Amino acid sequence: MKVYQTNKIKNIALIGSSGSGKTTLAEAMLFESGVIKRRGTVEGKNTVSDYFPVEKEYGYSVFSTLLSVEWNNKKLNFIDCPGSDDFAGGAVAALNVTDTALMVLNAQYGVEVGTINMFRYTEQLSKPVIFLINQLDKDNADYDKVITQLKETYGGKVVQIQYPIQTGQSFYQMVDVLKMKMYQWKPEGGAPEVLEIPASEMDKAQDLHNALVESAAENDEGLMEKFFDQGSLTEDEMREGIRKGLLSRGMFPVICASAGKDMGVRRLMEFLGNNVPTVEEMPPYKNTEGKDIAVDPKAPTSVFVFKTTVEPHIGRVSYFKVMSGTIKTGDDLLNEDRGSKERIAQLFAVAGQNRMEVPELQAGDIGATVKLKDVNTGNTLNGKGADNKFDFIKYPNSKYRRAIKAVNESDSEKLMEILNRMRSEDPTWVVEQSKELRQTILSGQGEFHLKTLKWRIENNDKLPIEFSETKIPYRETITKAARADYRHKKQSGGAGQFGEVHLIIEPYQEGMPMPEIYKFNGQEFKIQARDVQEHPLEWGGKLVFVNSIVGGSIDTRFLPAILKGIMGRMEQGPLTGSYARDVRVIVYDGKMHPVDSNEISFMLAGRNAFSEAFKNAGPKILEPVYDVEVSLPAEYMGDVMGDLQGRRAMIMGMSSEKGYEKLMAKVPLKEMSNYSTSLSSITGGRASFTMKFAAYELVPSDVQDKLLKEYEAQQDAE
């Protein structure tokens, strides 16, 4: 493949729901451009895009795949993205480094929840969108219904470029209202016959052509004036209007195809080559300092690594976008994130597992290199004179958690190495070694996400692993004030141990005042705060430690020891051994011995006094509660709401958004363990959800009783 200049490069993400036919479309485009001589199929497990063993095993895309093709003296870089919500990280990364989204829809199903979710990402990133209605040859294809859905969902910006004369088995003709021609294919597809539009279709074609002309003119004042003066625009003028409409998201063109039969694919690529904005027409990226970085091949070189894979017989492959300058074979670059130097031994234009060596890649281009020593996904590599750093990809939050461990305990260290390597490939993995729960917790996007990771570890790395339910990070707190005192006294020859601590504890909320008098059993305790320390806790909440000692009953040098003893008990609450939080402790009295008192004595006295007071202060268990947002078709609302209420959810609201319903709820984390599987089952995979930590809230009394019994049984067993 030759070197392409910046103004000849176009970067396009193939996005859409699972089953919309993106991988089949990619195969047809590679075939039409001459990259491959024979088209593979998903069923045959021989496509260029889905070439990893796990993808062949499960029959769906797991990774995004870069596909570079040459078409009419332009370079089109496609990134074929997974359709499943479980692998949204690949699509998010691809949308960030490409300039236009080609949204593929299945003509049988139209606008699906995956369409909605992917379109939302394009909105967030202000990316141009083209809709491709695919699989028009299927029996249940309904083009008119899909157009109606698109217009209901995305409004008048949806503009038809093409329409089929018939769908289903009879699909072999379509009318193009930009060129005002009819395209007709033989059964094997490929190159079409270009014909005049038949009289029976002329009125419809003319109406759609006029709508297209008007929409194109709306995006440019000069074109609008021409349109008013002449009543029409030339094809080149319409292309200019379409390109400007795409850039401003003022137009969402609709194209037709049957990728499986290679019908419409050649015309699609022609449309993309002529109308999609080039990289230099897009808004500039900003580095981490907020500075605009122009797509200039003559500027100092900066490249951003957006994807990393480890492939058999090759090792680490780094996929990058040239943010500025020109990267050449033999360049020495500095990793701005890690401080290490890297030499670029080889550069490739990529089509799946096919790599074509090139001498250089200019600003805006996307390519790959191999065997870099110390480069991870998200790193920036700079040449001489560049000091940029990029961090613009925001990945979705995790939605599914499981504890993971090696079947053989001796493999634990090896498992962590594999997980860290996989996280460098896919940043949506979150790996946490929880000291609190004594588990290694793996968080991802869904059950399929974890299922594919398990397959890869067991089949590629030959390491048996097992998943289990994640323990819940409960918290303990108190609901009322309580008082306690404790004397630690120990004498065993020589110097003894003595320390006595009197303290009051109460629930703490940010900014709450401290009473001057506390009453317990008819007795008043006057408090005079001499020192107040706020200690934010690693696990959330605060411990407020108040010194109210008068008369020197405890020397101030022993107060840090008392605090240490209290903090130690906060780390293992008396109810379930969970972390305690949001407590104010007032040490107001005590006793010491001139010889036997020391730090250990007061640490133990403080610990035990706190423990006794905690048990008398209405102790309660708190559980993590998450904000959950579900997007679903209206017909499933009742079933989904019923399922959530069975999970102790509090429904917070409902709304409609672009053809889909949105349900908002607060749900305890304990109840979300298998939610992705359940939601998929209820809605036939047509719903999706997001979840985000909201707060810790008190568990109901029946749940607390159950947790206390479980903890007691566990303690007895140990």
Image (tube, rainbow, N blue to C red):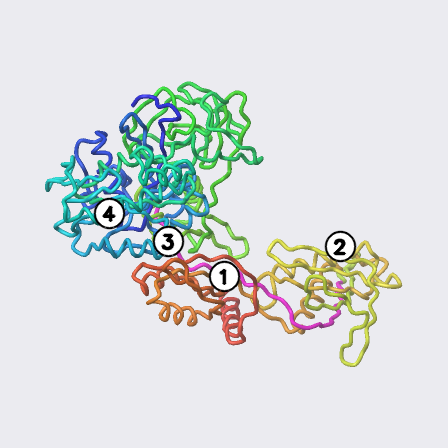
Q: Say which of marks 2 and 4 sits in front.
A: 4
Q: Locate the N terminus by quadrant.
A: top left
Q: Quadrant of residue 597?
A: bottom right
Which one is in front, 47 or 255?
A: 255
Q: Please rate how many residues cluster around mark 1, counting C-alpha atoms within 10 Å: few if below 14, some from 14 to 19, many from 20.
A: some
Q: Which residue is mark 4?
A: 134
Q: Say which of marks 2 and 1 sits in front.
A: 1
Residue 268 point in image, percent of width and height: 25, 38
The numbered mark, 2 or 4, whose residue comes first in the sequence reads 4
Q: Please rate how many residues cluster around mark 3, counting C-alpha atoms within 10 Å: few if below 14, some from 14 to 19, many from 20.
A: some
Q: CA distance from mark 1 to mark 3?
A: 30 Å
> Would residue 534 appear left or right of 112 to someone viewing this image?
right
The numbered mark, 2 or 1, whose residue comes first in the sequence reads 2
Residue 62 point in image, percent of width and height: 32, 45
Residue 397 visible at all? yes
Q: Which mark is residue 155?
A: 3
The magenta stretch spans which residues? 463-490
Q: Residue furthest bottom?
A: 522
Q: CA distance from mark 2 to mark 4?
A: 70 Å
The numbered mark, 1 or 3, whose residue comes first in the sequence reads 3
Residue 99 point in image, percent of width and height: 40, 37
Which one is in front, 5 or 174?
A: 174
Callout 1, which amino acid? Asp
Residue 62 visible at all? no
> Would residue 598 appear left or right of 163 to someone viewing this image?
right
Callout 2, which amino acid? Pro
